[in-house]
Amino acid sequence: MNEKKVDNKIKIFVIIVFFVFIVVILKVFYIQVFEYDKLNDLASDLWSRNLPIEADRGKIYDRNSVVLADNVTTTSLVLIPSQIKNKKETTKKLADILNVSYDTMREHVYKNTSIERVHPFGRRLDYSVAEKIEKLNLDGVYLVRESKRSYPYGTELSHTLGFVGIDNQGLSGIELQYDDYLTGEYGAIKYFSDAKGNKLDLSQVYEAPQNGVNVTLTINHEIQASVERELDNVMTKYEPETALAIAMDPNTGEVLAISSRPNFDAINYQDYTQEALNRNLPIWATYEPGSTFKIITLSAALNEGLVDLDNETFYDSGSVQVANARIKCWKAGGHGAQTFLQVVENSCNPGFVELGNRLGKEKLFEYIDKFGFGKKTGIDLNGEATGIIFDLEDVGPVELATTAFGQGVSVTPIHLGV
């Protein structure tokens, strides 16, 4: 009886051991087959390190492939503190070369981190400085390739191109608008180290960076250079607070040149005020368009068949009474009898008041809306303003009259150009 009990216990024990063995085998199989990739990645993270390699930003070209924004290859300082054998000596030598205090450099050398990017004084080093560091051949001290933005034509097109920050991220202009395209993907030099951070004698893996996408503008560099030169002449001769210019293709609306003053040097953007950096006047500044707006009223009247330019006459006495306001023509005494074509040629305000009345406020403001006034044009630059147009319910006889010849409303230069 006792022997039978012992046999049963042995059988139970064997079954339990067999069951545990099967569970272990299944678990190993599951780990090896289903969890392999995950665990392999976790293991690699423990003993592999990456030295980042910055990609070049995409270039910005004019319509004729002239490079407006380019890149210059530089080097930056990266430390792996765990690999630095003589930290005191390394700190002193690097501080001397980089012209910073011992304590400032010590914060980076002694930092408890796997990889330390020395920022900002270790970024984008001059060739002579990088060469001195390289000759030291210090353990745990690395120089990695970085890309620095350059603008071959200096301040030309500064507000439109914009500028980038210390990490090559777009902060304004085209650089910001198309940052997702211009920004490339980082590469890396992958090396291997033990748990203490000591570099292992294994081959390094180079992962090439992927450069950003190039962007081509409608700008014509030659026309742009002429606009910049003339704006400089205006500033020198007349000393205005601001000046701006836009050159556009009348057939397509493409912007061939655009600039304003004051402008800035994108490489040294930190030397300028936010006001100077952000005010792209051709798309931001609003003003009362005056007579340049009369083309809108004229187009609406012609399209509605409300005027015959050659055969219909209008008498200009020099002013016209509208409600409680008297609106004058620029010419004292008026132009007298004239065709509506002459009303346009003479830029006669009373004549355009008449066209506005024929259209009525609903129809005139319908055309103003269709021409895009009172809203953004959609130009691919940040900071565009909308201008100000009367709400229809606020338009009385006087507002209708003044709007017809471009007073009481505001537009941006790009609005009127488009």
Image: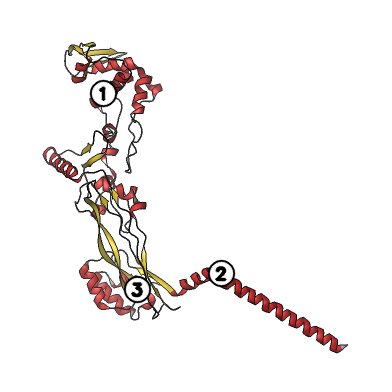
Q: Is residue 394 left or right of residue 248?
A: right
Which part of the image, by quadrant, shows the N terminus? bottom right
Task: Tell me which label, 2 or 1, sits earlier in the chain.
Answer: 2
Q: Is residue 265 visible?
A: no
User: Which residue is the site of mark 2?
Assistant: 35
Which residue is most to the right?
Answer: 1
Query: In the rendered view, would you say 41 is above or below 379?
Result: below
Could you say where residue 400 lies in the image, as x and y percent from the top left? 33, 19
Q: CA distance from mark 2 to mark 1?
A: 73 Å
Which residue is most to the left?
Answer: 237
Residues packed near mark 3 inside 10 Å, few (<14), some (14 to 19) or many (20 plus): many
Could you say where residue 132 lies in the image, as x and y percent from the top left? 22, 74
Q: Amino acid at mark 1?
A: Lys
Q: Quadrant of residue 234?
A: top left
Query: In the rendered view, would you say 265 is above or below 372?
Result: below
Residue 109 is tagged as 3
Residue at x-position 26% and y-position 64%: 74
For numbered disc 1, what is the local secondary structure?
A: helix
Q: Amino acid at mark 2?
A: Glu
Query: Which tag is nearer the camera, tag 2 or tag 3?
Result: 2
Query: In the rendered view, would you say 52 is above or below 273?
Result: below
Residue at x-position 41% and y-position 72%: 49
| Circle 2/circle 3 CB separation < 8 Å | no
Task: Tell me which label, 2 or 3, sits earlier in the chain.
Answer: 2
Q: Amino acid at mark 3?
A: Val
For numbered disc 3, what is the local secondary structure?
A: helix
Could you say where residue 226 lies in the image, as x and y percent from the top left? 15, 42
Task: Tell me which label, 3 or 1, sits earlier in the chain.
Answer: 3
Residues packed near mark 1 inside 10 Å, few (<14), some (14 to 19) or many (20 plus): many
Could you say where residue 138 lies in the image, as x and y percent from the top left? 30, 78
User: Which residue is the site of mark 1?
Assistant: 294
